[in-house]
Amino acid sequence: MKKDTRWEGVYSFEDSPFLIETLSELREQNTDNIAFRKGLVRLGRYMGYELTKTMDFDELEIETPLETTIGLAGKDRKNILIISVLRVAIPLMEGLIKTLESARVGIVSASRGPAPDFDIKMDYIKVPKLKEEDTLIICDPMIATGSTLISVMKELESCGMPKRIIIVGVIGAPEGIEAIKKEYPNVEIYITQMDRELNKKGYILPGLGDAGDRAFGEP
Ligand code: URA
């Protein structure tokens, strides 16, 4: 896990060759949608595993068939609530809950309009009750302008926000991270890799194109 020195609480997994290998497969334009979705699930699973390193564990006594020893058990795992921003976060969320098995899951359907305004349209929100002690994980693979995530968080504010809020993405653009950090300085952001910039249409460069289409569109 590598800290991005430009912001507080922003980390990438650029130091994990296995995750970058998977991301490289996603970036490759000839990767078909089956492999693309599988890659997103894999990234979710391993980023979930990396996230557990930032979570609390309790020591406990274990009786093996032979003797007593000391082990660990995740603390407060039932207080994890993962929100999936439709549609491309579905495979990423599927991977995350393979690791964070007892998490509750919420769904937000949000889509971004065209440049230059990138207006956000939110059609559907179904989120279990949020508690202060929850760890809220919002997953959205492409953190481009940041406007979708900011709108989602604004919407969730009316439900009462928990203390720890984490965004999990695959690729981040500095513009989007900056915008999120300006509005929500305490939010933690974990991405596989930070890219260079956005183009005029709001796509991340070098990026991987339209992630939703590549995961669910024509093969
Ligand atoms: N959404 C995508 O799918 N790709 C981008 O590059 C930016 C936003």
Image (cartoon, rainbow, N blue to C red):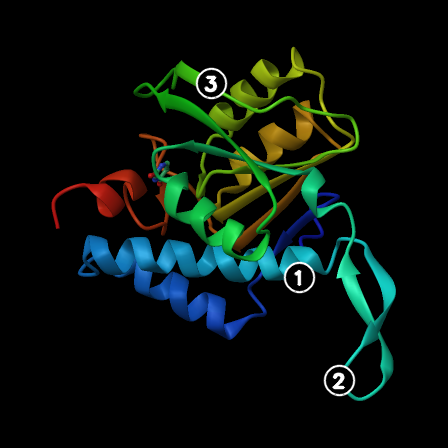
> In the figure, is residue 219 to the left or right of 130?
left
SS at mark 3 in the image: strand
Quarter of the view holding residue 117: top left
Q: How far apart are marks 2 and 1 (CA)?
A: 40 Å
Q: Extreme bottom residue here?
A: 66
Do residues under tags 3 and 1 come within 8 Å of each other at their CB atoms?
A: no
Residue 60 lies in quadrant: bottom right
Q: Which amino acid, mark 3?
A: Ile
- Mark 1 nearby-residue class (10 Å; few <14, some 14–19, many ≥20): some
Extreme residue toward the front, this view: 65
Q: Which amino acid does label 1 sit on?
A: Lys
User: Left of 94 or right of it: where is 100?
Assistant: right
Amino acid type of the residue tagged 2 in the rendering: Pro
Q: Which badge, 2 or 1, is on the more N-terminal residue?
A: 1
Which of labels 3 and 2 is toward the front?
A: 2
Quickly name the residue at label 1: 2
Label 3 or label 1, whichever comes before in sequence order: 1
Please state which of the two labelled residues, at mark 2 or mark 1, is closer to the viewer.
2
Front in this rendered view, residue 79 or 18: 79
**For the residue carrying disc 3, how many other residues have a C-alpha within 10 Å: few (<14), some (14-19), or many (20+)?**
some
Specify whether 70 is left or right of 161.
right
Disc nearer the start of the sequence (3/2)? 2
Which quadrant contains ligand 1?
top left
Residue 194 appears anywhere in the view: no
Give the residue at mark 3. Answer: 125
Give the CA separation, mark 3 to mark 2.
48 Å
Which residue is tagged 2?
65
- Vertical position of residue 64 compared to residue 106: above or below: below
Q: Is residue 128 above or below residue 164?
A: above
Q: Where is residue 135 in the image (x, y as percent from the top left)?
A: 70, 38
